[in-house]
Amino acid sequence: MSQSNEPHPLATARLAAGRPTSAAVHRYRAVRQATLALTRSLTREDMLAQSMPDASPTKWHLAHTTWFWETFLLVPNLAGYKPFDPRFGYLFNSYYEALGPRQPRPERGLLTRPSLDDVIAYRAHVDEAMGRLLEGAGDTFADLVDLGLAHEEQHQELILMDILHLFAQSPLAPAYAPPRAAPAPRTPEALAFVRFEGGLVEIGHANADGFAFDNETPRHRAWLEPFELADRLVTNAEWLEFMEDGGYRRPELWLSEGWARAREEGWTAPQYWRECTDGWGSMTLHGLRPLDPTAPVAHVSFYEAEAYAAWAGARLPTEAEWEHAAQGLPAAGAFMGSGRLAPAAPPPGTGLRQMFGDLWEWTRSAYSPYPGFRPAAGAVGEYNGKFMAGQMVLRGGACVTPAGHVRATYRNFFYPQQRWMFSGVRLARDLAEDEGVSDASFEADVLAGFAKPQKTVPPKYFYDAEGSRLFEAITELAEYYPTRTEIALLRTIAPEIAQIISPGAALVEFGSGASVKTRLLLDAAPQVAVYAPIDISRAALDAAAVAIRRDYPKLVVAPLRDDFTRALALPSAAQGRPVTGFFPGSTIGNFTPDEAQAFLEAARHLLGQGARFLVGIDVVKDPAVLVAAYDDAVGVTAAFNKNLLARINRELGGDFRLEAFAHRAIWNAEQSRMEMRLESLKDQEVHIAGRTFSFVKGETLHTENSYKFTVEGFSALAKKAGWSLERSWLSADPAFAVVSLLAD
Ligand code: SAH
Ligand code: AVI
């Protein structure tokens, strides 16, 4: 980048310093200084050019933000204040009709005068006067100062957006900031969805909660049908798949207006993608960089986001869905000041990520007034309200948004065709009523369990989408021997099992999860015609059904999403066939003996006369081995256990602080079971669904039992439920058994 020979104006620009200052003055100075700091790497020429009507020159931003303070605070409130230059009202008014005519927006780049030096002097003049106004003014101007600071922060982001647009027009592809040495990108986990039950929720800003723009008010109720939200943003790699599948050439994916716009402007990729000799590149504030496939796709219009969502069999979230999901999450993420000015791959882990920072997320909500919205009186009232037509809402902030600027209720808005802002895509999907995360029973069971002297929650509630994912992670742990051991055992005995499965049989599996063990049976017994997995976890069941259908194309797969402790009916595809039941994993150990007996009785009725039932059971062993299996060194089991609290927070309006509880795994020799508990680390109160519960320090919430059996003991239990042991297979150490039961 060529540097101007003149001294940089910032070398001489300083904010007035002097007497001790009030908090308001400190905040004011910090924000004003941050605006100037953004121009450090820019030349005078960079700061004058206007690359398109929607973008403004940096010099204009510097002057306009100053005009805002002068017009709304100094002129009406500072006795004797003289505007720096009366002509600036025309030049730097953005859109306030009440304040008179103004320089046409597309012609802001023609303002070679005032010079940059004059604009910097204008800033200093206004800053000095603002210092005088605020010093000793107490809270008198607090609301207007909050608005002015938020306004200036919006322009900080605009400066970066507009500079990127300008630099993207240059054949030299200048870098605004040097690229940061980043850790090697890691491929994000496959996209997963987090479920929300919906219902009557509240969104919008409550005035008692501090500053917000008027468009975020009033807080009001909204009705949400059950939905699910992607746990991260769509990546460049995923966007490439869309493009390779003809995404930009298939009108059926596009809204009519979007398709017309895409044709008119010749869209074939996101705004800043460039086809380079060695593959795709992307113009960023760090210059032209090779496209990072793991980073979220950026600079796409609402129309492109919609087309992508249609292609992905999903949709964009509404703003109420987004806000409901974001409530309670800290507004933390990759914002300006995080060291990079481009979005990056999500942090490893599970659950909603990138909700704040990285990129503004398109919603499918039109930017409209909330019920009861009233703009402020006077010119300031023109800030938001008058733009409420034809634009779409975006949420969450971006890597160029100043940290601390956004909140869960924050509503940004752009026209659906615009692409130069830092916009990205998060998918959402509808859930059918019966797929809602929390059946009414979740709330009832949690409240009933918490009302007991020993607080407890049934372990089936571990398995929301995140819980299922965490369980799969547990199965990979060195300490968690049961999965590995049972798989090895099944691999050895599958041929024997195959011999006792009739041709055309239906295989009915309870708690099928990822259906990994199933494959060993299906491979050994191709005579199985129908597979009916039953699981409470829709996320696990859906993914498993897709994978099994893909890999066993002749098999009829009839999944049943349900609680297997309820009275169930076999899917019609399984009816009338010889039936083999399959219940691996020692999930039966998560029942008490009474529950296990009741379950086995119900299963006998469900599977029908002549059925065979293959059940995996974990066997009693050295407590040290057991405890390690439930308290692994890296803390995955702890995360699985605590996810229950996160789920209560999300779905039942809970306010558990996860760090105030510790994971405990205890061997209860008397009952022959491992217990998982969450121990309160202090005296505390928690709220669930509007009810208050207290914990004393050291008190536990009992979350799971995992009974450990002997084959003889289990056989006796099964007998009470009308099943006879046909045979059993025992693994080598660590011991795990598979038994075959026959209905009496
Ligand atoms: N069979 C797999 C998964 C075991 S994890 C394996 O052996 O590795 C336990 C599974 O049972 C989870 O997928 C969970 O969602 C499911 N599950 C737990 N309680 C359930 C209930 N009451 N009804 C239906 N599924 C349940
Ligand atoms: C599913 N179930 C048999 C597991 C078990 O071992 O009880 C769940 C689990 N809990 C902690 N780790 C794994």
Image: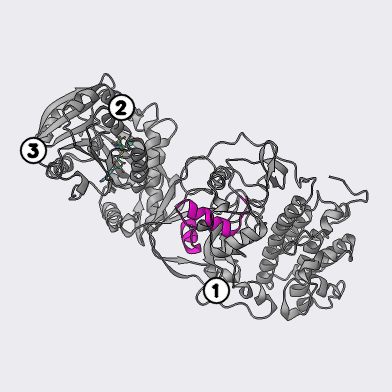
Residue named by callout 2: 487
Q: Is residue 31 above or below residue 462?
A: below
- In this rendering, does residue 202 appear at all? yes
Residue 24 in the figure: left or right of residue 426: right
Which numbered dot is residue 369? 1
Q: Locate the C terminus by quadrant.
A: top left
Instruction: Check whether the beta carbons of the residues at disc 2 and disc 3 lie within 8 A of each other.
Output: no
Q: Is residue 425 above or below residue 525?
A: below
How packed is label 2: few (under 14 Cα within 10 Å), some, or many (20 or more)?
A: some
**Farthest right residue?**
6
Identify residue type, mark 1: Pro
Tell me if mark 3 has few (under 14), some (14-19) or many (20+) residues whose alpha carbon lies within 10 angstroms of its own: some
- Specify whether 84 is left or right of 302: right
State which image quarter holds ligand 1.
Answer: top left
Query: In terms of depth relative to the viewer, which is nearer, 660 or 98?
Result: 98
Dot placed on the residue nearer the N-terminal end, 2 or 3: 2
Q: Is residue 17 visible?
A: no
**Secondary structure at numbered mark 1:** loop
Query: Circle 2 sits in a helix, a strand or a loop, which is it?
Result: helix
